[in-house]
Amino acid sequence: MKRFLLCTLLLCSSPLWAQTETDSINRDVWYNFMQAYQDLDASLFNQIHTNDVIRVAIDGNLLLVGQQYKDQNLENFNRWNQTRVKQKIEFSFISRIQSGLWAHETGIYKLTRFTDSGSQSYYGKFQVMLKKVGDRWKIYMDSDTNEGGKVGESDFQKGDILR
């Protein structure tokens, strides 16, 4: 009986641990990512990335590393603040894999920009490598593509949408 209870406890606790790591990743990375985009907060956005972050913009044929990427973020957010951009970003996950201090996640993002005349959404596939630094998850590598505009709402709806 003791052996049965121990096995049951171990089997039941594994998914709970994985769920806790997913919750930690959501808290440390994705909710802050969404908040930074909504609030146009470059500082918060840069804090969710490692100092040696690798950014690959596939459609732009661009690779940025570390401070170079963070400086570009500051420029983008400053421009958005000057033009008073109103936006929100959402994430739909296709794959989430975590092992130790590393995680790999893929999915679809939906960036919606709001104007006086309405809103427009933009979509892309993303792939990230996350690294646990101290007690916080951070983005180590981030790449995305919209595949020539082929990624859309139906792709977004197929994944596990972050709420």
Image: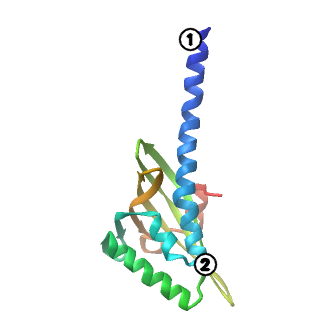
Q: Is residue 58 left or right of residue 44?
A: left
Q: What's the mark number on residue 108?
A: none
Q: Amino acid at mark 2?
A: Gln
Colour pattern of the rendering: rainbow
Q: Position of residue 50 (x, y in %)?
A: 38, 62
Local packing at callout 2 (Cα closer than 10 Å; few below 14, some 14-19, many 20+) is some
**Residue type marked 1:** Arg
Which residue is denoted by mark 1 in the rendering? 3
Instruction: Say which label, 2 or 1, has the lower sequence index.
Output: 1
Location of the N terminus (image quadrant)? top right
Residue bearing mark 2:
87
Residue at the extreme front of the image, as rendered? 134
Element at badge 2? strand
Residue count near mark 1 (Cα–Cα under 10 Å), binned few <14, some 14–19, many ≥20: few
Where residue 77 sits: x, y (%)? Answer: 49, 81
Residue 113: x %, y % from top left? 60, 80
2 vs 1, front mark: 1
Q: Indicate left or right for 61 with 147 as reference.
A: left
Q: Give the vertical position of 138 relative to 12 (above or below).
A: below
